[in-house]
Image (spheres, grey):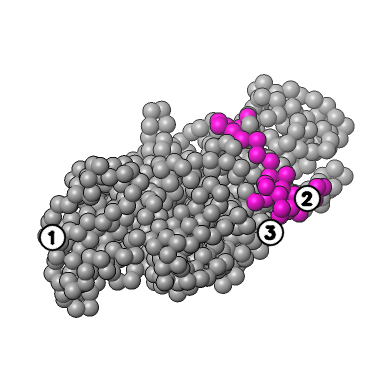
């Protein structure tokens, strides 16, 4: 073994050849078939020569005695800045990529490995141009030795809720036995039903099976327009609604967060030059000078924490329903195209740990399984085993192509880099690897998730995933579809860390909390702060209400005039139908009201109350049931309560005289308790930015400061 090789193998921190390279077959780069490359000489190079790839390609003729899995170690130098990526091709078929880190010297060559499949006899192995230049000295080829997994059984979240542990146990039990082919969603506001999401519908129609894993994004939960744009608000609420539906059906919701500028200056998350629109947000300005220690008094830190708290509330809303999630924040950081990856590994780690500590240790998020993204060559970006449950790779072929190979090289790259204690998965992908290929090659990704739109469905010239390929994926003996899931057994936690706005007193039922909502949810200035907008002809709200005894009840509907009054809806009570007008056209926009539907006989057990649109864009706030002996005045008394926060941070509560009031922040901490008078004015100037719950008797109202 020469001196350079020995130093490389002992010192390089990426995926290195081991001492067994002595028995490996060696192929010089200058003897490969070169296309637009340049040969160069150096005394330190093997054989005295190496190849500058520049924008070219090189092809080696590799001979192996038996078909199987092999390690290719590429000895290279790369002094062209940052990381550079080249594609790998075996026998004319794409087989993944290699990312080459920057090296100190142009003539000191170090090794980086990938794992590939070769057929018996002669094979071609090509390194082709993708992005950036790299210099190649030689490659070695040797038989791959597989290492068994010894997965951790413990989640990184202390005291996780039961369903989180149940989901994690399910994933660890099935890792290496089954995979789960999932898909990302896109048009969740325009399409209300989970099964009608265009990606899910396409897969189901193509294969006869629905995916068990579906991806969602907290994209519009924070950002410049999150507090003012009703479409953004509806998108944010729908991510929780659809994730809850999926969980109740036995599926697995996966969430990421394209985190927009926390200052709310730019409606963007890309770095300048990486995407459009972009932001110049610099999170390191929230550090104390010359350190990675947070300055908790800085406006940057406060803006970051405010956003973390808002998203924590989304996760805790799911937590209150007993929903566990795959949670992938700050993804693809080392790529550098998002603002959270723009300042290097050391600064990123401080941000990641702040997100984890704030969510878990301060805000009490206990339903998240933490998924961390890697490209396989960015170990210095790894937060550590105590912060990560699952190691994930996002993989897209570039140039883009249709390829359902197992990606064994990418799988083994992650295992070699981060060990065998963590589940390995494809958090995002173009073409979904065929499960049969995965398990034949020894690359059993825990799950995969085809990105939305033309990655999931053929569109124009793109056919990353076709109806035929989905049929093969979903009906593989190795794949778990939604119909294969047994359903989750864990109950929702008794204490989920926040007041539950959906908790009913047995009389009032919030529209957004109905058993089934097929409509958009938006903010209203009434009761819990949210209502359901019946816009389309097929929208509906369905309540399943259990009564211990049969009885006669008066039914009332509370509404918000977000657009105008006088809208008409149809109510069906156990099939009995009645149309009602929600106020008049003269009602002030933004006001609230209540209308009596009529008197109905409810049976013992389950009763179904459904509201559907008649004249659309009707916003329903709640329904309320009153036994016939009660008066309308008794019934609507609590709806006279109003809560408002003005521009001077003055919180005003009216109509709650004699009721107990508690003000609770997003962490679940009570910051004020009192008995209300007729009108109460409270200064909120000292409060941090974020979400607060105003609990008045049995009613809970959310506000954002």
Quadrant for residue 103, please give it: top right
Label 3 or label 1, whichever comes before in sequence order: 3
User: Magenta span covers which residues?
Assistant: 273-302
Residue located 74% across and 27% down the image = 52
At mark 2, the secondary structure is loop
Sequence-first tag of 3 and 2: 2
Residue highlighted by disc 2: 288
> How many residues crowd mark 2 within 10 Å: few (<14), some (14–19), many (20+)?
some
Q: Is residue 672 left or right of residue 516?
A: right
Q: Determine the residue located farthest toward the left in the rendered image.
A: 576
**Element type where label 1 sits in the image:** loop
- Residue at 51 percent across and 56 percent down: it is 651
Sequence-first disc among 2 and 1: 2
Question: Which numbered marker is on residue 384?
Answer: 3
Of tags 3 and 1, the one toward the viewer is 1
Provide the residue designation for mark 1.
575
Marks 3 and 2, how far apart in space? 23 Å
Closer mark to the observer between disc 3 and disc 2: 2
From mark 3 to mark 1, how far is it between C-alphas?
A: 57 Å
In x, y percent, where is residue 544? Answer: 25, 65
Residue at the image point whose x is 41% and y is 35% from the top: 454
* Nearer to the camera, 608 or 651: 651
């Amino acid at each position: 073994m020469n001196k350079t090789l020995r130093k490389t193998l002992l010192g390089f921190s990426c995926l290195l050849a081991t001492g067994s390279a002595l028995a490996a077959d060696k192929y010089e780069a200058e003897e490969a078939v070169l296309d637009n490359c340049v040969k160069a000489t150096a005394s330190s190079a093997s054989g005295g020569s190496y190849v500058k790839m520049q924008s070219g390609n090189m092809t080696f003729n590799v001979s192996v005695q038996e078909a199987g899995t092999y390690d290719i170690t590429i000895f290279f130098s790369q002094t062209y800045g940052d990381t550079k990526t080249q594609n790998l091709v075996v026998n004319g078929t794409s087989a993944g990529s290699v990312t080459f880190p920057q090296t100190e010297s142009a003539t000191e060559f170090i090794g980086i490995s990938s794992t590939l499949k070769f057929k018996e006899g002669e094979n071609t192995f090509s390194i082709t141009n993708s992005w950036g230049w790299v210099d190649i000295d030689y490659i070695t080829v040797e038989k791959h030795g597989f290492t068994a997994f010894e997965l951790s059984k413990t989640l990184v979240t202390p005291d996780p809720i039961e369903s989180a542990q149940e989901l994690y146990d399910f994933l660890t039990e099935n890792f290496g036995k089954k995979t789960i082919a999932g898909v990302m969603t896109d048009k969740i506001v325009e399409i209300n039903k989970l099964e009608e999401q265009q990606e899910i519908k396409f897969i189901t129609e193509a294969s006869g099976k629905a995916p068990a894993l579906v991806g969602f994004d907290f994209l519009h939960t924070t950002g410049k327009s999150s507090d003012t744009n009703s479409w953004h608000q509806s998108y944010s609420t729908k991510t929780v609604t659809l994730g809850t539906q999926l969980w109740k059906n036995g599926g697995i919701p996966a969430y990421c967060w394209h985190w927009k500028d926390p200052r709310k200056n730019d409606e963007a998350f890309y770095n300048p030059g990486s995407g459009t629109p972009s932001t110049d947000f610099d999170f390191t300005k929230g550090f104390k000078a010359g350190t990675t220690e947070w300055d908790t008094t800085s406006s940057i830190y406060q803006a970051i924490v405010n956003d973390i708290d808002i998203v924590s509330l989304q996760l805790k809303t799911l937590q209150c329903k007993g929903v566990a999630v795959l949670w992938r924040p700050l993804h693809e950081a080392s790529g550098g195209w998002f603002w959270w990856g723009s300042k290097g590994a050391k600064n990123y780690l401080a941000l990641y740990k702040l997100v984890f500590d704030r969510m878990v240790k301060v805000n009490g998020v206990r339903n998240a399984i933490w998924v961390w993204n890697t490209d396989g060559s960015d170990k210095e970006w790894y937060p550590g085993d105590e912060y990560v449950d699952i190691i994930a790779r996002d993989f897209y072929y570039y140039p883009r192509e249709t390829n359902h190979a197992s990606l064994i090289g990418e799988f083994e790259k992650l295992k070699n880099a981060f060990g065998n204690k963590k589940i390995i998965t494809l958090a995002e992908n173009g073409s979904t690897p065929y499960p049969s290929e995965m398990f034949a090659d020894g690359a059993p990704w825990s799950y995969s998730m085809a990105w939305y739109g033309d990655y999931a469905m053929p569109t124009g010239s793109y056919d990353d995933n076709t109806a035929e390929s989905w049929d093969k994926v979903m009906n593989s003996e190795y794949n778990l579809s939604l119909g294969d899931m047994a359903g989750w057994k864990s109950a929702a936690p008794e204490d989920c860390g926040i007041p539950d706005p959906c908790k009913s007193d047995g009389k009032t039922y919030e529209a957004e909390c109905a058993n089934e909502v097929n409509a958009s949810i938006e903010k209203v200035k009434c009761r819990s702060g949210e209502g359901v907008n019946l816009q389309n002809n097929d929208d509906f709200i369905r309540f399943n209400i259990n009564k211990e005894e049969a009885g006669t009840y008066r039914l009332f509907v509370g509404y918000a005039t977000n657009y105008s009054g006088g809208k008409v809806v149809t109510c069906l009570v156990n099939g009995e139908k009645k149309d009602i007008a929600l106020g008049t056209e003269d009602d002030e926009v933004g006001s609230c009201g209540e209308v009596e539907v009529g008197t109905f006989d409810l049976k013992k057990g389950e009763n179904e109350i459904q509201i559907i649109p008649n004249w659309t864009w009707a916003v329903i706030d709640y329904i309320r049931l009153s036994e016939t002996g009660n008066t309308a005045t008794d019934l609507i008394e609590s709806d006279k309560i109003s809560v408002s926060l003005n521009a001077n941070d003055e919180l005003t509560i009216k109509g709650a005289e004699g009721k107990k009031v508690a003000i609770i922040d997003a962490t679940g901490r009570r910051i004020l308790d009192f008995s209300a008078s007729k009108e109460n004015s409270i200064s909120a100037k000292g409060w941090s930015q974020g979400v607060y719950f105003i609990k008045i008797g049995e009613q809970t109202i959310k506000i954002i400061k």
